[in-house]
Image (cartoon, rainbow, N blue to C red):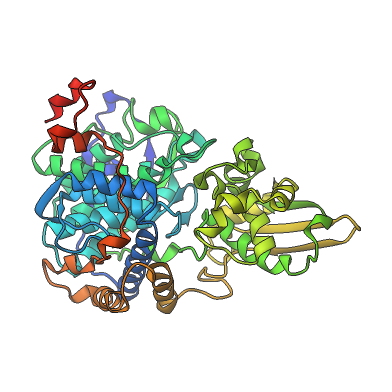
Amino acid sequence: MQSHIITVHPETDRLPRTEQLAWKIAEVAADTVPIEAEVTEMVINRVIDNASVALASLNRHPVMSARAQALAHAHPGGATLFGMGPDVRVHAEWAAWANGTAVRELDYHDTFLAADYSHPGDNIPPLLAVAQQCASSGADFIRAVATGYEIQIDLTRAICLHKHKIDHVAHLGPSVAAGLGTLLKLPPSVIYQAIGQALHVTTATRQSRKGEISSWKAFAPAHAGKMAVEATDRAMRGEGAPSPIYEGEDSVIAWMLDGKDARYIVPLPAPGEPKRAILSSFTKEHSAEYQSQALIDLAFRLGKQIENFEDVSEIVIETSHHTHYVIGTGSNDPQKFDPTASRETLDHSIMYIVAVALQDGSWHHVHSYEPGRARRPDTVRLWNKIRTVETPEWTARYHAKDPAVKAFGGKIIIRMKDGRVIQEEQAVANAHPLGRTPWTRPDYIRKFQILTEDLISPSECQRFLDTVQNLPNLKAADLSALELIVPPNRISQNLNPGIFDFRQSSTNRPKEAPALATLA
């Protein structure tokens, strides 16, 4: 890897394009270095993973809304939508929107944590959508995914967005644009402009993950992917972008991140160096924030040692800075103790998550968040006895560069009313590459089968799995076979009309909203 020092430059410096981070990223994207076999295998795992969580969320309201919006943008020869089969095609950017929302809705796919947070699997929906519309091969799609993961993970390693309360999807726009550059074999000059545009329009605050967390949490990555598709389209037509987008005196770094004295060291592959970052990411066994994965596994074990949860006096979770301040009591979010809070808020409350995991000894992507489960009086009482504490040890391990030391777990200390103390720590989740039961291909397949068994037939399940595992050999135009066919009676619709519905049918327009007529 090459380390690139990134600082803010006044306009009088006239920083050469080739010294800008966006250009260096573009050069990585344009590098035709071969993809290693283990990277290809992991790309296939993550395509399976994304499909499983996308189908499991197919009938959740945000996904229905995104799908309805996408269906208003039909495009023969375009991209497919999860569950709709290969015959339903929409414009690629709208497929990126709908499929990206479906993948993200349950917070149940892969993660990478370092200086900042990321869900690099969010790169896959927009890249697949464009690959389908542009009749790319399976091998080209794999190369694009490897680039998307590489750039997002490298940016996440180096540039912390969270401390400035900027949402982590600000790294996703550039990574998708870079991946599209790889997919379409664009020159660095075009990819450079696409990255600049994508970053410029995908920076937003972290309020989407704070307080009353709404459904926008699922839409935000999909929005970044859609913006990256549109940015790449504009760049291909010869349009430019704000630059230097990272280093300029009025840039993202200067005014949204560390400021005019900023100094970041961004690692990127050297010319000819394989893109391997996907191998540093890890998926979720449980549908919850990744920093809760190891603690869920730990809670399953500790809960077996408690006969009566009313006998618990206090539970303290010693963990990292990020866990304490994002999903713990350090956030100072009262909503994280609210039994009526949204699913999006509950999956960002480690206090709720540990309470339920202790009591149930299991975790389910639907049942563990149901209102009746969250409002159970005994759970609420236990929930309110839990607090988090940041410790230097766990914060250091969170930021460690050595994979053998890096950890996202913590220590759970349960103090009983009779004075007994039950305590144990767990550094990484069971499914982590260094965990008790590291995930391999059969685990991804099992997750897919479990999450889709009520939606697709066994034959459709097997057809998809056979197809995706043959991804390197798929020819141009064959990527539509990665779509899954869900019977129409198993797909719900969001029947609330929106602007696009009014545009499609003038008979639906209410007389009291004449301004909508301009959208016809």
Question: In which quarter of the view is residue 435 placed?
Answer: bottom right
Q: Measured from the top left, where is residue 273 in percent x and y?
A: 30, 64
Q: Measured from the top left, where is residue 220 in percent x and y?
A: 37, 42
Name the residue rendered at 52%, 53% in the picture: 289
- In the rendered image, which quarter contains the C terminus? top left
Name the residue rendered at 32%, 38% in the picture: 202
The answer to whether 207 appears left or right of 500 in the picture is right
Q: How many marks?
A: 0
Residue 97 visible in the snapshot:
no
Please tell me whether residue 9 is drawn above or below residue 405 in the rendered image.
above
In front: 256, or 479? 479
Q: Measured from the top left, where is residue 78 in percent x and y?
A: 13, 54
The answer to whether 389 appears left or right of 325 in the picture is right
In front: 253, or 426? 426
In front: 68, or 33? 68
Q: Measured from the top left, where is residue 178 in percent x and y?
A: 25, 51
- In the rendered image, which quarter contains the N terminus? bottom left
Question: In which quarter of the view is residue 55 placed?
Answer: bottom left
Residue 512 visible in the snapshot:
yes
The answer to whether 512 appears left or right of 58 in the picture is left
Please tell me whether residue 486 is drawn above or below residue 344 in the rendered image.
below
In front: 359, or 16? 359
The answer to whether 167 appears left or right of 76 in the picture is right
Name the residue rendered at 80%, 66% in the picture: 307
